[in-house]
Amino acid sequence: MSTRLCGQAAYRASSLSNSCHQFRFVVRPARRYASSSTTKSQKSIYYPLLATIIFGGAVLSWNDSLLIRTCYAESPDESDLVFEKPKRRKGASKEGIRDLISSQHLQVKRSWENPGVYAWGDNSGRVVAPDSAENTIKTPRRIAFFDNRLLRDIKLDRDAGAAIDENGDLLQWGAAYYQDCMQPTITLRGKDLSSIRLSRDRILALSKSGSIYSLPISKQEQEDGVKAKESSWVPFWSRSAEISYQGLSIINRGWWEKIDKIAAGLDHGLLLTNKGRVFSVATSSKGVNKGQLGVSGLLSPNLGEIHELKTLKGFEVKDIACGDSHSLCLDSEGRIFGFGDNSSGQIGFETGTETSIVDVPGLLSTNKLFAGTSQTSRITSIAAGGNNSYFTTEATKVSRPGENVEDQRGLGRLSADTWAFGSGIWGNLANGRWTHIQSTPVKIPSLSSLYEYDETTHSTIPIRLAYLTIGSNHAAAVMDNVTYTSASNKSTDHDTNWGADIVFWGNNEFYQLGTGKRNNLNVPSYIQALDQTAERKVRGKEEHRFQITPRKLVTLGDGRTKDVEQRVECGRGCTAVYSRMCQ
């Protein structure tokens, strides 16, 4: 007897009886999502714990007690079920039963008990492992300095690391800060920072109040540069700042208008206000302007000089993104504007001598993406990094004139898709191919048209992306799949937590994908759990994929109650996962 859920792999259970509603199941490591575009080349995408599966009216649910281990084969009909009955060890607690059942539960539990930062990849600049002389860190490793610390933000480059601690102070480390740096050091204090971005040789920082600070990465330049005057607690008295920095302000700021988002490439940054206005700023005096500032004819921009993108006046921009030398803007109507370097097609225009550099925002044509599909679409988010760009869409099936009844099946069905363009030689396009230049957006099959069953609403829902994070030539995507973090010692023996799925792809020269191997990946793939040693200690030789812990108000291991989540950041040849204090 076999049943298909959302058109995906069938699961056989010929020995199930009418009492199977008493059983609980865990699927590992079977296919993860239902997708209308699954191919054999996507075998590296696995599907986590399904919410509910129905066999002839019998339901297997989360709160039951039989474990079913499913191994995925070449075709759905080759999948086999192995039934396991978990046994409570003598004297074992409920928590011990959960340890036996779910690797995902253990990952969530550890992220709350021991918050901190995991990093891996290129360590030539002492960023991924500041206290180690190893040039590469092949698998996720904790940075000891951040143990039991929450951060507001973190960004990594090959030679420079920067983070914002719980108090809003800036921390820096790495060889670009100073050569013999062995651990993070507080540099910019008392600004209540909320987010940061790294450029070639400067840091762009945004405070909660909307103030912008631009400061050099180098400790020497911070000490030797001109120091601004700052107010003190003594009335009518000012003092020199501890380090050199620039305070940036936007032009003609309106009432209640402030900067609420920043983005940065190698030599430029974008600033977005809560009123939808966009400004650009040069963040390096060493770089070449390739149009990424969005100002026509601007050849030699001054460091820290802010320019309003007047071409975008009348468009309410809601999101911004920067690659190395290109920029993207998304407005409230779902339109994308691109400008800057287009040598790899990264702003979505056909490559050529006249379009290799576009110095003013141009509208990306997306009308043909869903041509002939009976769907209306809308772009929902953008991301960029290196020589690549990405965006997500939501498309709804609609009726067309003259359609018969069979063609109108699934009206109103929503699908969430992810698209990529730009360089693909490292597998950056995530479409299973190695492409040098891609100027037309291509769909990422493994991150498109995915569905799952939601037990809360008792319906099949599309799986969107929570967010994308893009490094110089690799990337990660965090799924917005159904998660559960309410299991406690007061719930049932087999109640278990699980997080959001996360996949990686692209260049792996410095082991930045976290697979422990060096081969590049052109298809999004899972990696093993971050605490591999502890995982094997509990579960023997079995290895399980990494799931990232979603936002939750929890009591941490040190007794503090905080609103916290895990976040991933892809940098230049390196990657980090950190415990973020939600603000």
Image (spheres, rainbow, N blue to C red):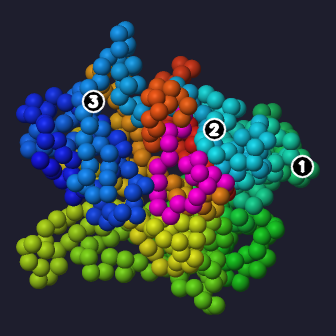
Q: Are marks 2 and 1 in contact (CB under 8 Å)?
A: no
Q: Quick check: is 516 in the magenta stretch?
A: yes
Residue for point 36% across, 69% down: 378
Asked if 252 appears above or below 579 in the picture, the reply is below
Front position among marks 2 and 3: 3
* The residue stretch that appears in magenta: 510-531
Q: Which residue is mark 1?
A: 220
* Sequence-first disc among 2 and 3: 3
Q: Earlier in the sequence, mark 2 or mark 1?
A: 2
Q: Image check: 145 left or right of 99?
A: right
- The amino acid type found where label 1 is placed reads Gln
Q: Position of residue 340 (x, y in %)?
A: 63, 76
User: Callout 2: few (<14), some (14-19), or many (20+) C-alpha neighbours within 10 Å?
Assistant: many
Measure how far apart labels 2 and 3 are at the Cα level: 33 Å
- The residue indicated by pointer 2 is 141
Q: Secondary structure at mark 1?
A: helix
Marks 1,3: beta carbons within 8 A: no
Mark on residue 62?
none
Give the x, y percent position of residue 15: 13, 37
| Residue type at numbered disc 2 | Arg
Q: Vertical placement of 442 versus 489: above or below? A: below
Which type of secondary structure does the marked residue at label 3 adopt? strand
- Pick the front one: 14 or 433: 14
Identify residue for label 3: 84
